[in-house]
Image: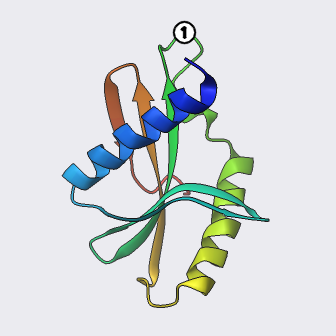
Amino acid sequence: MDRQRFGREGENKAVRFLEKSGYKVLTRNFRSKLGEIDIVAIDHNTLVFVEVKTRRDSNHGYPEEAVTPRKLRSIIKTGEYYKLLNPQTPELLRIDVVAIDGEEVRLLKNVSQ
């Protein structure tokens, strides 16, 4: 399976997981010149920018380990731009990571701190 298809399937699995967890998914793959956000959702009264990381196995480390400080800075900048374009969304902001390791799905909330 090619990387794009594998990543897309991981994002599909993440969306299903988030929706079952009560998140309302607003958009997927939001892109701007500042960067990309895999999933934008609302969790209760919080606008959440979700990074999805998928691995076939843990031979190369855990998926969440691939979310670097540089990636977080990119998500923050892109998220601020998204919020500017969508002022009606909640004021509280958060970054979560959905880590998919084979069949296991983990949600890490508020990873930007």
Q: Is residue 63 visible?
A: no
- The local secondary structure at tag 1 comes to loop
Which residue is denoted by mark 1 in the rendering?
A: 59
| Labels in figure, total | 1
Residue 107 location, quadrant: top left
- Rendered residue at 51%/24% (across/down): 62
Which quadrant would the C terminus be assigned to in this image? bottom right
Residue 64 position within the rendered picture, expressed as x and y whole percent measured from the top left: 52, 35
Q: Nearer the viewer, residue 10 or 48?
A: 10
Residue 60 location, quadrant: top right
Residue 40 position within the rendered picture, expressed as x and y whole percent measured from the top left: 47, 63
Question: Relative to residue 39, is residue 43 drawn left or right?
Answer: left
Q: Identify whether 26 is placed above or below 81.
A: above
Residue 2 position within the rendered picture, expressed as x and y whole percent measured from the top left: 60, 21
Q: Nearer the viewer, residue 2 or 33?
A: 2
| Badge 1 amino acid | Asn
- Rendered residue at 65%/53% (across/down): 72
Residue 66 location, quadrant: top right
